[in-house]
Amino acid sequence: MSGILWLGGGCAGLLLLAMLIVPRDLRGRRGGDRVEAINNIKQVGVALQEFDSEYGCFPNDATAVTVKADSTTALTLGGSSSNSYFRQLIATGLKSEKSFYAKRAGGKRSDDLLADDAHALSPGECGFAYIVGLSGSMDPSTPIVMTPMIGGTTRFDPSPFDGKAVVLFLDNSARALPLDSSGRAILNGMDLFDPRQPFWRGKAPDLRWPE
C-alpha cells in the first residue's frame, strides 16, 4: 500500500515538475528568438552603414534610381515595403538575405535565392520594418530598423519576443524596448514614433513595413 502511495506521489511530482519546466522552456525559446533578432538586426545595420558610406544616405527612392543604373539589377528597389528598400543592399553587393530574418507572424526563413523579386526578400523573408529618409550624419540615437511590427500601424506584436520590441539605432546599437498594453514601444517615457521624440524633430517618421 505504501508502494502505491509512493508511486502516486512520484507521478504527481513529475507532473508538477513538467508544469514548472515547460513555461521556463518556452521563455527560453522566446529569449533565443530575441537574441537572434538582435544579432540579425545588427548585421543589417552594418550593411546599411556601408551603403551610407557609398551613397551618402540609407536606401531611399533617390538611391533606388542610382543603384538601378549602377548595378543593372532587375530587382524592385523602392516602394511600399521594407523588403524593396533592403533589396538595394543586395543589389550593391550583400551576398545573403539571411540576416533579414526575425520571428514574426507570417514570417519564414530565407531561401537565400537572390536573382529576382520572386526570391530576393520575397514576402515573409524580411522581418524588419524600416524608416526611410535617414542618413548616417543624423542623430545617432535615431531608430532606423525595428521588429516585430504590426503592418500598417506603429504598434508591435508582443508575442514573438515576450512583450519586447527589437530596435536598431543609427549608431548600430540594438535594444529590446518594453511594450505597453497597446503594443507601443516605449522610449524616453513615450511612444517610439511620437514626433516629440528629440530625434524625429517634430515630424513623424516615414515608416515602411515588411511584406
Image (tube, rainbow, N blue to C red):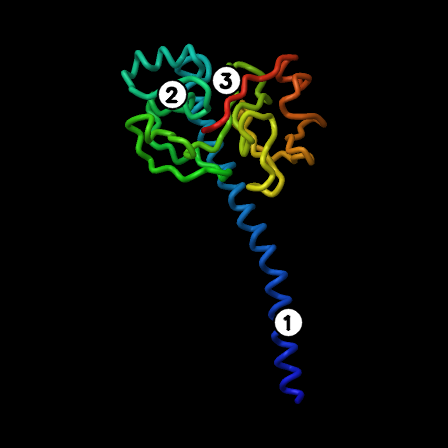
Whole-percent x, y for residue 48 in the image: 44, 23
For this view, does 172 lie left or right of residue 65?
Answer: right
- Residue 50's place in the image compared with 99, above or below, is above
- Under mark 2, the amino acid is Gln
Quadrant containing the C terminus in the rendered view: top left
Question: Looking at the rendering, which quadrant does residue 178 occupy?
Answer: top right
> Could you give the CA–CA distance between mark 3 and mark 1, rounded to whole angstroms?
55 Å
Choose between 185 and 124: the one closer to the eye: 124
Secondary structure at numbered mark 1:
helix
For the residue labelled by badge 2, is the local secondary structure a helix, a strand or a loop? helix
For marks 3 and 1, the one nearer the N-term is 1
Answer with mark 2 or mark 3, whichever residue precedes in sequence. Answer: 2
Please tell me whether mark 3 sits on a helix, a strand or a loop. strand
Query: How far across and how far down the image is residue 87, in percent?
Result: 38, 24
Q: Residue 83, which numbered label?
A: none
Q: Is residue 22 above or below residue 151?
A: below
Query: How many neighbours does mark 3 have within 10 angstroms: few (below 14), some (14-19), or many (20 or more)?
Result: many
Q: Viewed as shown, does residue 72 lie left or right of 85?
A: left
Q: For mark 2, does the 10 Å Cα neighbourhood hold few (<14), some (14 to 19), or many (20 or more) residues?
A: many
Distance, label 2 to label 3, CA atoms, is 13 Å
The residue that label 1 is drawn on is 13
Q: Quick one: quadrant of the N terminus?
A: bottom right
Viewer-closest of 29 and 2: 2
Identity of the residue drawn at 64% across and 25% down:
192
In terms of depth relative to the viewer, which is nearer, 49 or 30?
30
User: In the displayed image of the protein, which residue is found farthest to the bottom?
Assistant: 1
Question: Is residue 44 visible in the rendered structure shown here?
Answer: yes
Q: Residue tagged by mark 3?
A: 132
Q: Amino acid at mark 3?
A: Val
Residue 173 visible to the viewer: no
Residue bearing the label numbered 2: 88
Q: Position of residue 180 (x, y in %)?
A: 68, 34
